[in-house]
Amino acid sequence: MGNTLQKGKLDTAYLIKSLIGVAIMILFRFIPAPAPINACGMAIIGEFIGMIFLWTAVDMMWPTFLAIVLVGLDAMVIYPNSWQQAGVYEAGQQSFGNWIALFVLGCLLICYALEKVGTIRRICVWFITRKAARKSPWMFTFMLILAALVISLFLDVAPAELFVLGVAHEIFEIMGFKKGDRWPKYVVVMIAFSAVIGFAMTPICHTLPILWMSIYSAISGNPMNIVAYICAAAPVGLVIWLLMMLWMKKVIKVDQGVAQFENADWSKIDAMKPGPMGAREKAVVIISVLLVATWVVPSLISLVAPTNPVYLAMARLTDSSFIFMAVCLLAIIKIDGQPLLDLKEAFAKLDWLPVVLLAGIMLVASPMGEATTGIPDWIAANIVPLVSGMSPYAMVALICVLCVLLTNVANNVPVGIIFVSAGVPMCLQLGLNPFPLALSVCVAANLAYTIPPAYVPVGIAYADPYCNGKTVFKNGCYMAVVSMIVCALLIYPIANLVS
């Protein structure tokens, strides 16, 4: 009887927090609006605050669906030129109908295909089986962590970390390391931090950079330029990563006292290599490479020949069109009687959280830049004067420091949303190029290293059996300081150069 009652017990704490978030989303519209914000603008702000509270304290999924209903009540006021017959349909278009939600869904499908055929593991093992990796414990460590960084450049942060950790755990066992040993502990830390840094360096299949750059595009009217993003963010991330490796080599001295390397059975390491690429893997890789080329080539052409007919045709198709062309090809082509991408299987195994989260964020973030809410005019009258005396360099540097600081004590999702949603309109009001500020948020707000609530990879490292929270936190504090300094110094001049 006792067990039956326990199973049916209501989760009161969860319910109370849910009601608080819902109340914020519903009742905020009734707070007197500071001019020039109108009641519709106050409703959007309340839905924005309520969703961030619910995402942080309750759940990352269902608040999006509630927001569709609530934004639908005001959608026809926010978007007076909408062709929809009812506001809730406009809200649906602004959320799950937004291109960003579809784009990320396509990215998830492509990544699933690459994981399924073993390409990710092949890349990781390739690095640690090079001759250079056997020269010393440090070179082996460097190549393993470099593999983590490279994989993180085009794979979502948590899967990238988990894939490399899986390979690392095999290495720990082959070499005879035990839980609590020094070298594995720091390897886990470096893999986690490399996943974080790599995630910030490119927007390729990376949910949050894509999201924040999409908010920038929606508010500024400027398209997201993948090449410009990579050209600016990649050097900054590489400097941060190299400073991490320097810290591990010179201060932590992670390669000292690793006796297991002296008697390592390298034949067992070599046995981790996947066999030769089969026809299925080759086909998936070729299609994936061609897809990336369709993203990068238009951006390169736009820099030198913005009126070129090839660029104009590819720009009209958009990145989303190419990704779904690739999905269709993978589903159509069958080898050994099986499609390269089984969509039924993929949809059953995909993590839908990124799609639902992005749909909700775009739903409430886009109206922040609409004149019909009065929010842009309020920002111009109240926030812009606070920074109007600062140089663009100083302003972006301050944003970098604040983003890194806040994202290491709070979840990076709301940090990025708030700074992009408020910062881009502020730059437009000041007559400044908003790209450096948006990029600074995309990079800095992702550089969380210290505590699990800040970022998923940190929590994974805390929970790893070969590591511990104390080690992650102490080294994370160093990385946070380094990231603040590097971002503050480098992001603005590099972003200004390539934008």
Image: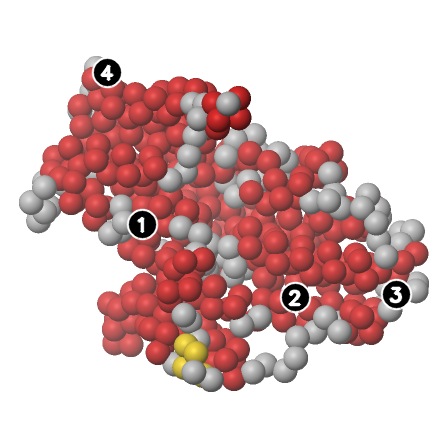
Residue type indicated by callout 1: Ser
Mark toward the viewer: 3 or 1: 3
Q: Which mark is residue 15?
A: none
Residue 201 visible, this angle: no
10 Å neighbourhood of mark 4: few (<14), some, or many (≥20)? few
Residue that carries the numbered disc 2 in the rendered image:
124
- Compared with 131, 244 (above or below) is above
Q: In the rendered view, does 291 fall on the left or right side of 360?
A: right
10 Å neighbourhood of mark 2: few (<14), some, or many (≥20)? many
Mark toward the viewer: 4 or 2: 2
Residue that carries the numbered disc 4 in the rendered image:
31
User: Residue shown at 62%/44% (left/top)?
Assistant: 460
Per the model, the C-alpha gap separating discs 2 and 1 is: 34 Å
Q: Which mark is residue 264?
A: 3
Residue 153 visible, this angle: yes
**Marks 4 and 1: CB-CB under 8 Å?**
no
Q: In the rendered view, does 175 fall on the left or right side of 223?
A: right
Per the model, the C-alpha gap separating discs 2 and 3 is: 19 Å
Decide which of tag 4 and tag 2 comes sooner along the chain: 4
